[in-house]
Amino acid sequence: MTLSRALILLALIATIFSTMSMAVAKDFIVGDDSGWTTGFDYHAWAANKVFRVGDTLTFKYPAGKDNVIRVNGSDFINCSVPPNAPVLSNGYNTFVLANTGRRWYISGVANHCKSGQKLVITVLPPQGITWSPAPSPSPVPSEVPSPHAAPWPASIPHFGLSLPKKIKMFQ
């Protein structure tokens, strides 16, 4: 009996630790050691990474000499800075990835974006959480079950009665 309790306890501890490791968020330094700069392939940098809700993206660059702007997909493609977009330029900016979906970032300095200083990522749900569509409804039985299998008394008819017949039956 003691051995089985020990095995159950061990299994419980292993489950807790595996769940904890799945919930650990990552901090991604954009461009790794190169940081946020021109002449770097951010598409290739992001290609082998998995970004999840709860992770952070940190942009490091010389303060006042560059910037980072979060934009939408069309502004990303066109390298255009929306008029009211916050322009971050302090040299160290961190974004928490709070929702699933696409994220686009560009540099708004001169021709930096057009020369490739832009990043697009896709944020996935946290690890260990699977999001799937709702299950489809159960099929309707093609036959009426026998009264012996029904959870109600067999003397009360449940199928094929119209409303007036039911009312007359209970008067």
Image (spheres, grey):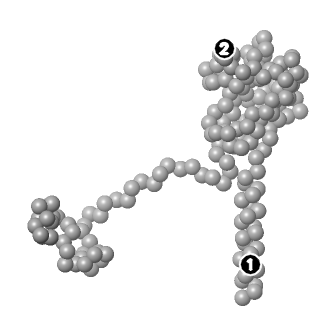
Badge 2 crowding class, 10 Å Cα cut-off, few under 14, some 14 to 19, many 20 or more, is: few
* Whether residue 30 is situated above or below residue 150 in the rendered picture: above
- The residue that appears at 62% across and 36% down in the rendered structure is 101
Q: Relative to residue 121, is residue 58 drawn left or right?
A: right
Q: Relative to residue 144, is residue 133 drawn left or right?
A: right
Q: Quadrant of residue 37?
A: top right
Residue 169: x %, y % from top left: 12, 70
Identified by mark 2, the residue type is Pro
Q: Relative to residue 68, is residue 63 drawn left or right?
A: right
Q: Which of 5 and 139 is in front in this view?
A: 5
Q: In which quarter of the image is residue 82?
A: top right
* Whether residue 49 is situated above or below residue 112 in the rendered picture: below
Residue 110: x %, y % from top left: 78, 11
Q: Which of 87 and 10 is in front in this view?
A: 87
- The residue that appears at 85% across and 23% down in the rendered structure is 90
The quadrant the N terminus occupies is bottom right
- The residue that appears at 69% across and 16% down in the rendered structure is 81
Identified by mark 1, the residue type is Leu
Can you name the residue that lies furthest to the front here?
171
Which residue position is annotated with label 1?
A: 7
* Whether residue 155 is situated above or below residue 168 in the rendered picture: below
The CA span between labels 2 and 1 is 62 Å
> Which element carries disc 1, helix, strand or loop?
helix
Front tag of 2 and 1? 2
Residue 131: x %, y % from top left: 57, 49
Which residue position is annotated with label 2?
A: 83
